[in-house]
Amino acid sequence: MSASLHVAVLMGGWSAEREVSLMSGKGIAEALESLGHRVTRIDMGRDVATKLTEAKPDIVFNALHGTPGEDGSVQGMLDLMGLKYTHSGMVTSVIAIDKVLTKQALVPHGIPMPGGRIVKSAEVFEGDPLKRPYVLKPVNEGSSVGVAIVTDDGNYGNPIGRDVAGPWQEFEELLAEPYVRGRELTTAILGGRALGVTELKPKSGWYDYDAKYTDGMTEHVFPAQIPDTIAAACKRLALEAHHLLGCKGASRSDFRWDDERGEDGLFLLEVNTQPGMTPLSLVPEQARHLGISYPELVQMIIDEALA
Ligand SMILES: Nc1ncnc2c1ncn2[C@@H]1O[C@H](COP(=O)(O)OP(=O)(O)O)[C@@H](O)[C@H]1O
Ligand SMILES: [Mg+2]
């Protein structure tokens, strides 16, 4: 076992994914203690720099999700403070949290992603920005927060109604993307290799916030029952995206696969640079299938940050 460290676990904060982050942080802190490390738990507030200065940790384990925490701001602060931290650095985080910048960085390198464009929310009340079905989603949220799937049958009205609950009420601008029918796949990268492919099968509806975080609402199939060519493509694309963006530690790439279109139907949706680390989350689950326990996973992420 490596030397005992003093690790500050940064969690919580004020993003839309605060609750998920608190669960990730709890799991990570307990794992670190089980490994013999000393842990300072920090629920991030505006005084985070003061807390870190007082704690003087050897390293910061970033267990934050969303904005702030996954967006580069915290990474920049930690850089200025001269503190080592887990996962991706500032520039990578700034790009990866933004679904438009991610496309601009990856598509020219041949990574297939759905087309799309930014629309002012007010425009969607005038008419559809894309042919139905399509997806409207915030540019820089996570956990499916604010994602609306606009179906052919006019689930939000046709045109979308101003008074119908949806992300257009909360966000001034949204990313509109063609809806990719078919299946939901995800691949984790850890220690510079792709762990595998999980298929997510929500028991009803689509892979929204509740389907992600309510135990039993989504079946996780590992390894995904898909052709070898598609599994290989997911692993290759997730690894390429990880390297092109300059990710460090663990990342997780989300895909949609239109199984009527073979390999041409595979699209990367996004790269998560601060993937969920609750004991039920996908990265720990893929690691476990490969014989890597949750504490071992946490130690591997620490080791990569120290290297
Ligand atoms: N273009 C798309 N086609 C089909 N489903 C989509 C599309 N974009 C998003 N979704 C659905 O919304 C979920 C969340 O979208 P994603 O882009 O991964 O954002 P985040 O996970 O950061 O909220 C996806 O897992 C998928 O179920
Ligand atoms: Mg996602």
Image (cartoon, rainbow, N blue to C red):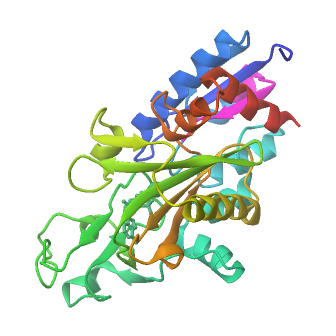
The C terminus: image quadrant: top right
| Place of residue 82 in the rendered image (x, y in percent of width and height, measured from the top left) | 84, 39
Q: Nearer the viewer, residue 176 or 191?
A: 191
Position of 284 compared to 117: left or right?
A: right
Residue 260's image quarter?
bottom left
With respect to residue 62, does 135 lie above or below?
A: below
| Place of residue 304 in the rendered image (x, y in percent of width and height, measured from the top left) | 81, 37
> What residue is rendered at 33% in x and 63% in y?
147
> What residue is rendered at 43% in x and 36% in y?
20
Position of 229 compared to 130: left or right?
A: right
> What residue is rendered at 60% in x and 24% in y?
294
Q: Nearer the viewer, residue 156 or 85?
A: 156
| Residue extending furthest toward the right | 307
Residue 108's image quarter?
bottom right
Residue 111's image quarter?
bottom right
The N terminus: image quadrant: top right
Residue 83 appearing in the image? no
Q: State the extent of the magenta-drawn residues as a range.
A: 52-64
| Place of residue 293 in the rendered image (x, y in percent of width and height, measured from the top left) | 63, 23
With respect to residue 149, does 134 lie above or below?
A: below
Q: Nearer the viewer, residue 177 or 193?
A: 193
Quadrant hosting ligand 1? bottom left
Asked if residue 204 is among those painted magenta in the image, a careful observer would answer no
Residue 168 appearing in the image? yes
